[in-house]
Amino acid sequence: SIHAGVHIKANDRAGREKLIRYAARPPFSEEQLRIVDDDRVELTLRSPTKAGQRTVMLTPVQFLRRLAWLIPPPHLNMIRYYGVFGATHKMQ
């Protein structure tokens, strides 16, 4: 996601390109993904889980299912409200 406070001037082509590259980047790098054999894919996590796990082994179908889960359904509002704008804040 991109922070709403990011400003780019109208004629700043390099700034626009940098922002577009940032927004279009994949959820993981090629270095994090390794195909172990025909029925296993290993994904190295950016940071370890609370249990200390650094890699996840998945079948190709499990991997694709988890990857597809990151794509929101059509017409779904992805804006999250928090702080004083959140539904459970005491000022509401």
Image: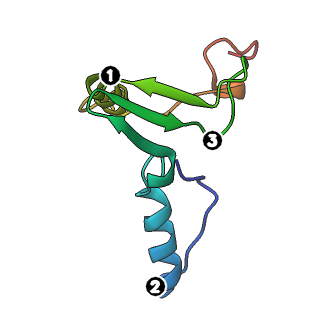
Mark 3 neighbour class, 10 Å CA radius: few under 14, some 14 to 19, many 20 or more: few
Can see residue 87? yes
The disc labelled 2 sits on which kind of residue?
Arg
Residue sitting farthest toward the bottom: 11
* Disc with the residue nearer the chain's start (2 vs 1): 2
Disc 1 versus disc 3: distance between alpha carbons? 19 Å
- Percent across and percent down for residue 20 are 43, 66
Q: Quick check: 61 above or below 4?
A: above
Q: Mark 1 highlights which residue?
A: 62
Confirm or deny contact between disc 2 and disc 1 (CB under 8 A).
Answer: no
Label of residue 46 in the image: 3
The disc labelled 1 sits on which kind of residue?
Gln
Q: Quick check: 15 above or below 35?
A: below
Q: Mark 2 highlights which residue?
A: 13
Which of the two discs, 3 and 2, sits closer to the camera?
Answer: 3
The disc labelled 3 sits on which kind of residue?
Arg
